[in-house]
Amino acid sequence: MNSLKQQFETLGSIIDRIQFRSVHKWLIFLIALGAVFDAIEQYNIGYAAPLLTQQWGLSKTEVGLLTTLTFGGMAVGSLIAGILGDLIGRRITYMYNLGLYTFGALIAAFAPNLEILLLGRFIVGLGLGGELNTGITIVSEFVPTKNRGSSVAIVNVAAGGLGIFLSAAIAYLILGPFSAFLGGDEVTWRWLLGILAAPAVLLWIYRKYIPESPRYLMSRGKVDELNRVLSIFEQNTLKAKKLRIKKFFDSVAGTYEKEKVRFRDIFSAGLAKRTVGLWIISALTFGAQVAITVFMPSVLVEQGFTIVNSLFYSMVINTGGLVGAILSSYFAAKLGRKMVLGWGSLIAFAIALLFGLSQSTFMILLLGSILQLMFMLLNTTTWLYAPEIYPTRIRAFGTGASVVVALVSASLIPYLAGYIFEIGKATGLLSMIAIMYAIMGITTWKLGVETKGKSLEQLSEADVSINGASSTSGKFSA
């Protein structure tokens, strides 16, 4: 019998041999659809904030606290989902997270006071934190190697670019043109927070059509289910009646025990500089994006726009984010990750300062759109860059740690941003964002490594040493 390691290699070869088919596209579409709802749910509280401020007398700091608990819940949820994904499977963990944030959305929609609303948003965060991470893991584990990057990028564009744009568009429609039909300003924000219970319908679809990750099934020795899932991809059908199960494996050689990865490994010789740099970059770019996206409607209201107009203009501004998410893969490939992150952060620094000083509607829309473009360009590039700087053995752990850092930042920075907004108005808020990007730019040039044109093996060489694993030539096995 072949060893389990050899069987995993065989499984990878089978997945690559099957190649990319319509069944892969359908499953990616379902995961991307969930990611869109994920992004909408993350940011809808920001669009409800002006009405909540009017009706409940919330301060900017309390609005920031709503976002803090949402993203704080995401950080916790991401860690829980990572554990559950390995224990009970990617598929059921994905559905559990979808159901959890749907439940939280309903609590938030019917909240009688700020305390219950905060509870609902924390539960929303718990679900959101695991949904996107688990979805990306599912996609990366069932697509062929050559399609992995583009497939994960599609999910990221759906979540970051399209989702944020639709979040503003839905808020504009519910709080604007449809407001009278839905009961007026007193209740429309509840519709905005509760309408995202709709993804509960997706649970039935996902339960029926999304299969478990073949790699997870092999790691658990579930050979019958593994053969069924591989047959789905080979025969390009999700219809059970048409499926003829082929025996790809007769048995699995035991269960897979991963080599232990310790926290200190990502701070070992050669990796400490990379990890510190990545953490600073992740915290600043994601924290800045969340803060300005959440407070954008409030910034526009302060500039003299009505609440409805501020939502419409936020939707227009967020088209820049959609463009930025799409452009990120092109620029990162042509210019390199370090160059995009370094120069991009300095451009974002200048745009944030100019935006904070703008008075005319045209300049506010133009600079706001460019700023959102830069947010998404830098965020997406960061998530492309993170896995490339670690050796294979600790790649998932290192990347996951940076995601948690980003989520913790996104939970704390909006609270700080709300406080600065209270005392420094829009100019103070945008100045804070500019300073964050200035620090990010300096960090990128000082601590970042360029990954363009280098294989993962090359990036794992030289001064990278873990527990004395590097050889005398300085190479570390990727």
Image (cartoon, rainbow, N blue to C red):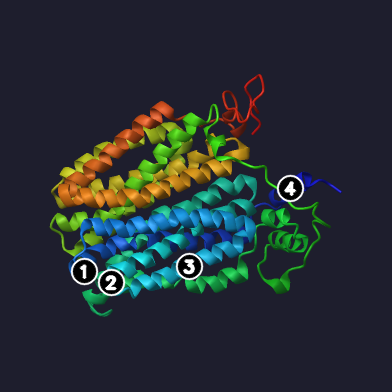
Rendered view: 380 above or below 249: above
Task: Point out the tag, 3 or 4, that comes first from the N-terminus.
Answer: 4
- Is residue 434 rendered to the left or right of residue 471? left
Seen at 43% across and 45% down, the residue is 405
Number of the label disc, if any, that sits on residue 56: 1
Decide: marks 3, 4 in contact (CB < 8 A)? no
On the rendered structure, is 445 left or right of 455? left
User: What is the C-alpha distance between the residues marked 4 and 1?
Assistant: 56 Å
What is the spatial separation of the Cα atoms under label 1 and label 2, in whole angstroms?
A: 8 Å
Give the Cα distance between marks 3 and 2. 21 Å
The amino acid sitting under disc 4 is Phe
Disc 4, SS? helix
Residue bearing the label numbered 2: 113
Identify residue type, mark 2. Answer: Asn
Q: Position of residue 342 (x, y in %)?
A: 37, 32
User: Closer to the camera: disc 2 or disc 4?
Assistant: 2
Residue 369 placement (x, y as % from top left): 28, 49
- Residue at image x 40%, y 26%? 446
Helix, strand or loop at label 3? It is: helix
Q: Are marks 1 and 2 in contact (CB under 8 Å)?
A: yes
Q: Which residue is identified by label 4?
A: 8
Name the residue type under label 1.
Trp
How far across and down, in percent of the image, does residue 346 sit? 31, 34
Query: With respect to residue 119, does 412 lie above or below?
Result: above
C-alpha gap between disc 2 and disc 4: 52 Å
Q: Quadrant of residue 92?
A: bottom right
Q: What residue is pinned by disc 3?
A: 100
